[in-house]
Amino acid sequence: MSARTVDPLLLPHRSAETAPESANQGCFHCGEPLLGSRLVAQIDGRSEPVCCQGCLAVAELIAGAGLSDYYRFRERVAERPTLTEQQDAWSAYSLPDVAAQFVRSSGECDSATFAIDGLRCSACSWLVDQSLARLDGVREASTNASTGRAHVSWDRDRLDLGAVLRAIARLGYRPHPLGDDNLVQAQQRERRNALKRLLVSGFGMMQVMMFAIAIYAAQIAGERMQPELLALFRGVSLLVATPVMFYAGAPIFRSAWASVRAGGVGMDVPVSAALLLAYSASVWNTFSDSGGEIYFDSVTMFIFFLTLARFVQMSLRHRTTEVSDALARQLPACAHRVVDGEIVDAPTSDLRPSDVILVRPGEVIPADGELLQGDASVNEALLTGESLPVRRRAGEQLTAGSVNIDAPIYMRVSATAAASGLRRIAAMLQRAQAHKPALARAADAAAARFLRYVLLGAGLTAAIWLAVDPTRAFEATLAVLVVACPCAFAIAMPAALSASAAHLARKGVLIVQPDALESLAGVDRVVFDKTGTLTRGEVSVQRCIPLAELDEAQCMRIAAALERASEHPLARAFASLSSGEIADDVHTFAGAGVEGVVAGRRYRIGSPRFVAELRGAASAEAELAATVVALGDEQRELARFELRDTLRESAPGVASALRERGVVSEILSGDSSEAVAAIASRCGVTRQFARRDPTEKLSHVQALQAEGRRVAMIGDGVNDAPVLAAADVSIAMARGAGLAHASADMVLVGENLAVLPEAIDVARRTLRVARQNMIWAAVYNFGSLPLAALGFIPPWVAALGMSLSSIAVVLNATRLLPRRTVNGGVAP
């Protein structure tokens, strides 16, 4: 077993100074023999010997916190500290093989997305962000409390995954890298712990309220309760309220302490201050003869309703991340690789392009690849939403995450598991969930400013009432601290946005940029690409027309070799024609075609104009009804291929559905005018633009924006990436190119165009619900603050109002969630 070490992040200070061992002196911290240790801890300017690095860390941590009197007052020496299981667990993530499952690398930078247990409000996310930003090597840290997600990027040479996880754990939160098999168990554990706290606080509140009602009833009736009975009621209330305070309320106090320790003032700071004030005053009045008020009923009620609000918020967060977590877990951990004719089980993460693997019936396809022989029946429900299996022939592409149905298949891997379309989409979705939209950031900033005024208002309230009527100062100040806590204000916007993201994800629309919903709500023009968007992109060669000395078979062979390197949907038409010939020096030109060398000759395949440029000639291009692709070399045009595509079933009704919502549809394509016109006629689209290259597409969208239009662009190819990036909101098809995904704000996983009108409805409804939440939270906070300061709201009413306002905005946001299906029906 390797020796254990303490990570530098856990040590506030390490002394380089050493001292000779004394035969009669033990460790300053634990009293154990020094056993040759020459380590010393700096305690109030003194050098004290310690026996190990653990004692050194703890002793200097205690001294650094200003708590060195601990050593003067302690009655016995402390136990020798050891590293906990949790701390050791983070070290495992520093191993390259383990980290590779969760980390995405780009140049010298690594990044990962985490699910974090215990995030309760924007203050929690602020604390995580600030603490991570202080780590040497962290480039970016973004945490979203409403989804419980954090996205962190760092310099690979200065930091590793284990150190990042350990830094988050030090704050009292528990991080889980997405893709971790323990994520589901972590969510279940978080839910169980929250339920236990909710039950303890609910039971305690009911018991305390029974005694409080008896006391209040006597006061209202003008009767005097016997002192012994009153003392009994107060004592029992103290016993019941104490576990509610320090067990159910523990997350509140931990969050407040972490916020203060980090130099900030979070949402839980005024809440904790109010609870501690109320509890301390109640304990004092219970044991004193002053007969002052006790607030155990307010304390337990406040904690119960606040715990209930956070339980509802946690449940909403779990539902909003179900789809991304399912995508992250979809790929199997193990694949069956074929090595020298033998089947060898290997980790999915070890698969490399050109590996041949076996997928047995019922197994999930672990990586994107090409079917080598025969036919296959695969279920692509997760990717397309289509529940019926589809047939794939030899040479066609199989997608990671699909399920093999009926017979063993052999396939050649075309991309690593980490680079598969499924993982790429899941990573983008998780990254979006970790970032806050602009609306949510603005709400957080407003809540933070309001929080400062709350604390200032509480101080002014106390000062004024002490001058006017000191007997009412405590209750009024307490009510101000409780009633004006802007928890509802802070979660109003994120709750609505997260619920909508979950709704759309279940419909097959994944939001990969945080501000996409706001942009989609204002769209008044939708621009469609044609091939692979309005059509399926399942293109086949309808006819080959040789134009020179090469016959049809030779032209097909050359075309297939060139198109193997292209991700454009038209290239798939030649996949089944491949004869094993490989093109060299291949270059792909977006929106034009492919150039490469086959058998020593340079060829081009693509638009007739692009092919003609290779020989320095102009194209005498004819407009044909079918999509036309030309093949040529440096001397002549060799052939033309007429390609046929299939219109998507959902395409014809989209334009009319969008028109009903005040949105105009256009087709913007690089295909011939006749081919575009045929599709436009079938889809009911009146505005159509053909023969547009990527530059012209970009100019077209920018011209629409210059007219004041809010443009949504839908595409799938590499040539669509520039215009997708320029649109107000961009939507990529799931089977599209990786560059298109990277430029998109949303991804249509199911590739069902019929969900677009519904997505616009959801986006518009989201903004309405978000505005409702913000208005309610603002009215409540600004309206209740002066009433509490004037003494019209007692503490228990303040506790109830603040908690119910948080629950109200969360429940209002849940209206945006999709309804669950029950036995084939629909249930809320």
Image: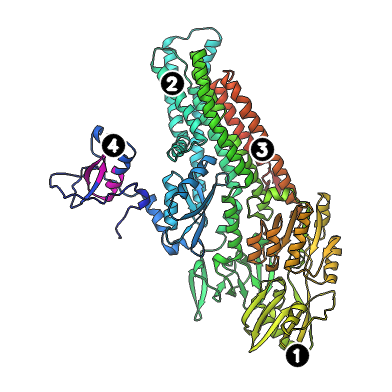
Does the magenta run of residues contain 46? yes
Q: Which residue has dot 3 on it?
A: 812
N-terminal of the two: label 4 or label 1?
Answer: 4
Q: Quadrant of the N terminus?
A: bottom left
Q: Which residue has dot 2 on it?
A: 281
- In this picture, residue 71 sits left or right of residue 523: left
N-terminal of the two: label 2 or label 3?
Answer: 2
N-terminal of the two: label 3 or label 4?
Answer: 4
Query: CA separation, marks 3 and 4?
Result: 50 Å
Instruction: Point out the stretch of residues depicted in magenta.
Output: 41-59
Q: Which residue has dot 1 on it?
A: 551
Q: Nearer the viewer, mark 2 or mark 3?
A: 2
Question: Which residue sits at x=51%, y=38%?
Answer: 195
N-terminal of the two: label 1 or label 2?
Answer: 2
- 88 or 227: nearer the viewer: 88
Give the percent coordinates (x, y) of residue 639.
Answer: 77, 85
Determine whether the residue tagged by mark 2 lies in a helix, strand or loop: helix
Q: Residues within 10 Å of mark 2 (few under 14, many from 20)?
A: some
Contact (CB < 8 A) between labels 2 and 3?
Answer: no
Q: Nearer the viewer, mark 2 or mark 4?
A: 4
Q: Nearer the viewer, mark 3 or mark 1?
A: 1
**Amino acid of disc 3:** Asn
- In this picture, residue 284 sits left or right of residue 588: left
- In this picture, residue 45 sits left or right of residue 322: left
Residue 721 circle label:
none
